[in-house]
Amino acid sequence: MKQFLLALVSLFIFASCQPSKEETVKKSDDVEILFIGTYTQKEGHVDGKGEGVYVYEMNKKTGALKYLATSDAVISPSYLAVHENGKWVYAVNEFNGGADEFAGVTAFEYNPEDHSLNYLNEVSSIGQYPCYVSIDNTGKFVMAANYVGGSVVLFPINEDGMLEDYTSYKKHSGSSTHPRQDAPHAHQIIQHPTQDWVIAVDLGADRTYEYELDTLSQTLNYVGDYPNSPRMSGPRHLAFHPSLDVAYMLNELIGTVEVNLTADSIRMRRTTQMISTQEEGDTRDPASAAIKVHPSGKFLYASNRGELNEIVVFSIDEKGGLTPVGRQSTLGLTPRDFEIDPSGRFLLVANQDSGTIVTFAIDQETGMLSETGYVAEVPTPVCLKFLK
């Protein structure tokens, strides 16, 4: 009888300690879940110290970050893509597999109960140093860009979230005049958020490549490729405006943003503006990295690394044109990526070489950034993605 009473008391205590469904919903309403990709090993451009993909929560009111979990261990899960169902996360494994094998792309499953990020499977990227991954609009395919080899690859997603072997592979060609442009180096592949066409950005070839994604044949079909001017610009990433037929191209090597029209007849073939991310007379290497449009469509942000280590702020007019607003130190070294939270109130910067994620508040009238005082230590962060 005594043992029965003790068991009953223990059960009561356990039950009383568990959060109710209402408490769980309330907590999820107060925070956003953030995934952070990292480098885990030493490479030519970085001394990777991460242990995998990190899971954090961000306080919606303050922007403060709190550690939750680390994924199962894989090599350098650098750039990430989060599936719209909130269950699956995909990462490129950014390393050189050597003469005998390629690098990889990994699928994880996210558990919202304990915030674990569990390994599902890994497939070959059919290239080396894959540096970008995205999910198509149907949610049925993952696309990856291989920096070394200059190729883009399509992978079907099965019903369990795992990746199947590639069904389409496209290798770029060409080069340009900068020392880093001796061969094609695909740096991004992304589908327009409301249309079917896909754009791949190639830093080495100084070109953008347009593809059609055929979901029935599971192929990327070549449509055309377009030179990026001037030569030696080194296009790295582009970002689409949420409501205008405009895309913004960030040129890593010369530190400029191009405003490109995306209407069918002139898609990515007409530039209406080119504007520098640096102040006049600044001759330092910009090493531009990331570019994002504010959810409101009113502001554009770009990061410069090297000696600059800053976020540059532009306002966007009703036609998509850009005007410089200001710049903000990232309070760290090598801002390889940054992300704007879903509410548009905060901008978080991943400082790769100082191992920090810094939260800034966004002025909703001007777009300018201000320090919040919140800094999270994360080893060699590369990419930030919020749970959708």
Image (tube, rainbow, N blue to C red):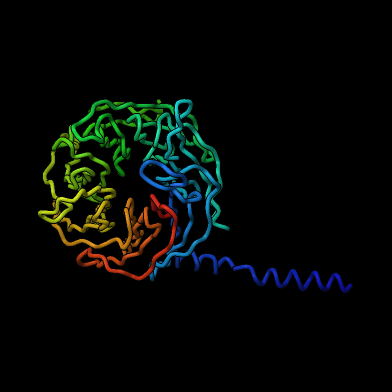
Q: Is residue 373 left or right of residue 33?
A: left
Image vertical order of residue 380 relative to residue 42, above or below: below
Residue drawn at (37%, 57%), measured in percent from left and top? 354
The picture quadrant where one finds residue 31 is bottom left
Between 115 and 359, the residue placed more toward the observer is 359
Between 297 and 95, the residue placed more toward the observer is 95
Residue drawn at (41%, 42%), measured in percent from left and top? 43
Q: Quadrant of the N terminus?
A: bottom right
For the question of whether residue 49 can be seen, the reply is: yes
The picture quadrant where one finds residue 365 is bottom left
Q: How many marks?
A: 0
Residue drawn at (46%, 48%), measured in percent from left and top? 85
Residue farthest to the right, as pictured: 1
Q: Is residue 233 left or right of residue 159?
A: left
x, y percentage for residue 339?
34, 55
x, y percentage for residue 119?
55, 44
For the question of whether residue 318 can be seen, the reply is: no
Q: Is residue 145 left or right of residue 31?
A: left
x, y percentage for residue 267?
19, 36
The picture quadrant where one finds residue 212 is top left
x, y percentage for residue 118?
56, 47
Residue drawn at (27%, 37%), measured in percent from left and top? 201
